[in-house]
Amino acid sequence: MSERRQDGLGGQDNGDKQNKQNEQDEKQPMRHGYTTGACATAAAKGALTMLITQQPVSEAEIWLPAGFAHTFELIEGEFTRDMAQVATIKDAGDDPDATHKAKIVATVTWKDGGGIELDGGVGVGRVTKPGLPVPVGEAAINPVPRRMLTQMAEELLGEYGIAPSRGVRIVISVPDGEEIAKKTLNARLGIIGGISILGTRGIVVPFSTAAYKASVIQALQVAKATGVRHVVLTTGGSSEKYAMKMNPQLSEEAFIQMGDFVGFSLQHAKRLGMEKISLVGMMGKFSKVAQGVMMVHSKSAPVDFGFLAQVAAEAGAELQLQQAIAEANTAAQAGDLAAEAGLSTFFDKLSEYACRHALEHIGGGVTVETALVTMKGDVLGRAEIVG
């Protein structure tokens, strides 16, 4: 369950947002934050320490998978002989994370029979669909945070000489988790009732490309596990909304926001056995796909207006329109010129080029469809090629 995909990626179209993010990446390094998994581990360490020592604790240091230790400030600590509870406030750094400033609470109680038992409380989601790294029915605490929590507890119990016959139960809660989850795509992935406790390295890297890619793979895995064989890849929330109207027969798991990572998403969709891949997007990015560009960030490659003019010529445009398209400032403007001239075949041909380049990129073997839409959701052009 990716931090980016579920606890930071909302419903708006991501094109402009990603452009701003990448522009910021090129400036001064931004402050990283800490994952919900790291916060949960720190809170649990504080709570377990209080349970063992019967003394208040105001901070906890943990070792992060990223390769360094960090000390977390703890708040609202309380304890009895049989229970201890403490919280920490998540700091996501300069990452636009839905869980930034969320309160992560750990409650630790003794249990007979030894061992470490983990569960989620209020505001931590439950997994209801296959395809995620946590089994159906369990709390949405990802594998790495589970290992961090278990290892921390085992080491602390050993450090204080607690007999192996005595274990602990750790419950992680997020009081506002159910509300926070409404800003995420958790429900679509089958995580109900709250957020996920996430993180593979313990830190949140601002605008992490790796996190975004991981979220795409995860969404594709859920789609496969729920029986989807036709996925629809979009560049963001707006294009996804229009794609859903175009494909009402498909379940919500079939719709995946790929952002700028067209080629990457195509490759993994094929790898995971999808039989048909639909691409739905707007002129700005999909004119690049038609050129053969598979990473469509604004700075990855310029729009080739000569190519667009050539496509217009193939569609039967008069020389004056071809020249106007060649001199356009943006792909959207080029599209407006073609639309005003009633040249609908221009968009069909662009869609066909996008299909062909997509199939070439992944080596065929699947059916690829491309649909070009306007900002209002009107279909400009469409093509489908069986690979």
Image (spheres, rainbow, N blue to C red):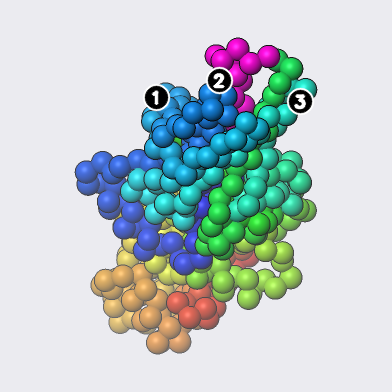
Q: Answer left or right for 226 relative to 72.
A: right
Instruction: State the residue in front, 280 or 192.
Output: 192
Residue 153 is covered by the magenta coloring: yes
Q: Which quarter of the image is occupied by the N terminus? A: top right
Residue for badge 1: 68
Numbered disc 2: secondary structure: helix
Q: CA distance from mark 3 to mark 2?
A: 17 Å
Q: Position of residue 87 (x, y in %)?
A: 49, 43
Figure disc tally: 3
Which mark, residue 109? Answer: none
Residue 14: x and y in percent read 43, 61
User: What residue is shown with label 3?
Assistant: 112
Q: Is residue 172 magenta?
A: no
Give, as a single range, the part of the protein colored magenta.
146-163
Which residue is depicted at the point 68% across and 40% down? Answer: 119
Q: CA distance from mark 1 to mark 3?
A: 33 Å
The residue indicated by pointer 2 is 156
Between the C-alphas of marks 1 and 2, the distance is 18 Å
| Kind of residue indicated by mark 1 | Phe
Q: Residue at x 56, y 15 (%)?
A: 160
Which percent across, then down, holds residue 54? 54, 28
Instruction: For label 1, count other residues whose C-alpha is less than 10 Å away and answer few (under 14), some (14-19) or many (20+).
Output: few
Mark toward the viewer: 1 or 3: 3
Compare marks 1 and 2 and give the one earlier in the sequence: 1
Residue 191 seen from this side: yes
